[in-house]
Amino acid sequence: MIFDNHNRPITYLRLAVTDRCNLRCFYCMPEAGIRYMPKQQLLTYEEMERLVTILARLGVSKVRITGGEPFVRSELMSFMHRLAAVDGISDLSITTNGVLTAPHVADMAALGVKSVNLSLDTLDRERFRQITRRDELPAVLRTLDALLAAGIETKINAVVMEGQNTQDIVPLTELTRDRPVDVRFIEEMPFNGEGSHYPVLHWTHRRIVQEIQSFYPNLTKIPDPRYSTSANYRIPGHQGTVGIIAAFSRTFCGTCNRIRMTAQGTLKTCLYDDGVLDVRELMRSGATDTGLEAAFLRAFAHRPANGFEAESHRSTVTESMATIGG
Ligand code: SAM
């Protein structure tokens, strides 16, 4: 296992397979005028498989496929089958908006996909349309049902946005009553392609917990899995659990075991850095596996202690989460 300069193991890669998305969530992307990367600037599946193989040799055992929306890239499931066969990868997971996902659920279950994060900010069709600028809630709910029917571990990720969907916190929490689903509420971050919406973030992790507690006074803290980014709770009698991710307050950096690869092959060792290594350039200029390994190790030896330090080393955060690989 490889440890970074703050003694944190690096075991988890979030791999963006595309920067394209079929939704236009206002907190993630502008409605129009997005400049997608030309296809030749995106990593090919072969390049991704190569770097996952190298990272697995260095101790990465978990890969979560992300984007953009992973299912808008063609042949995604064949690529997942190839990744599942990489030596050392024991946990292959995916995060998706669920619009195109339902038809692939049986294949994912057969492949042993460990968990699916489904992004869903509201159960109200009109609010869903306003937030995502697309009328796709029914398709997302079909995916949720299919995932649960297939017995795949499912987490719902909901970004909490002041003035937009705070009235959805309780209805989304209610999903845990009869379903074995983890509903996780995420603090909004300034990765919307434009910069922060708020001078101050009012809906912090503390306020989200208070809101849930005011409706469910018996909300009970449960132990957090190792390296968890969420603080986890259970409502007695409910099948599922509730989690809060302090993504803006950045309370979990001390145990961060994750790195990110953007769709164009830039390594990020912190969500808040602006890219620390151009892996695509290295690969396309003929780097050997040993050379790539050495470059990764150098990057891991210079990780910022936390997201505040990473942010302080760069210009203002304005990029879209879809280009980062959220
Ligand atoms: N399309 C996939 C999905 O919807 O899960 C994967 C990519 S998406 C960028 C990954 C996650 O980032 C989603 O759960 C999304 O809600 C979250 N996200 C995007 N912009 C965000 C922001 N500004 N603040 C917090 N979370 C954000």
Image (cartoon, rainbow, N blue to C red):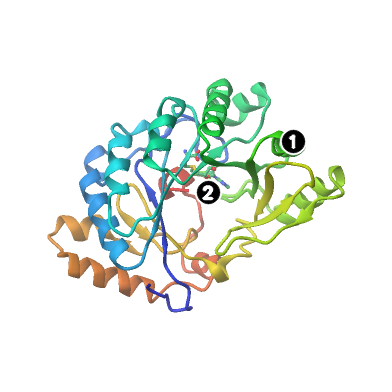
Is residue 86 found left or right of 22 in the rendered image? left
320 sits to left or right of 188:
left
Query: Measuring 50% from the left and 50% from the top, which residue is drawn there?
Result: 318
Query: What's the residue at 64%, 61% (across, down)?
Result: 224
Q: Which mark is residue 320?
A: none
Of the pair 196 and 161, the residue shown nearer to us: 161
Q: Residue at x 78, y 43 (%)?
A: 237
Q: Amino acid at mark 1?
A: Glu
Is the CB atom of the residue marked by disc 2 within 8 angstroms of ligand 1's nearest atom?
yes
Q: Sequence-wise, which precedes: disc 2 or disc 1?
A: 1
Instruction: Between residue 99 and residue 104, name the one nearer to us.
Output: 104
Q: Which picture quadrant has residue 105?
A: top left
Which residue is at a point 61% across and 31% down the rendered structure image?
131
Q: Residue 65 in the image: x percent, y percent?
A: 40, 46
Quadrant where the image shows the N terminus: bottom left
* Up/down of 196 relative to 271, above or below: above
Side (left or right) of 226 relative to 249:
left
- Disc 2 vs disc 1: which is toward the camera? 1
Q: Secondary structure at mark 1?
A: helix
The picture places residue 186, in percent across and down from the top left corner, at 63, 48
Q: Secondary structure at mark 2?
A: loop
Which amino acid type is marked by label 2? Phe
Disc 2 vs disc 1: Cβ atoms closer than 8 Å?
no
Q: Which residue is mark 1?
A: 174
The residue that mark 2 highlights is: 191
Q: Is residue 231 left or right of residue 275?
A: right
Looking at the picture, how far across and down is residue 128, in whole percent? 62, 27
What is the distance, in whole Å, between disc 2 and disc 1 at their CAs? 28 Å
Between 110 and 159, the one lying in front of the other is 110
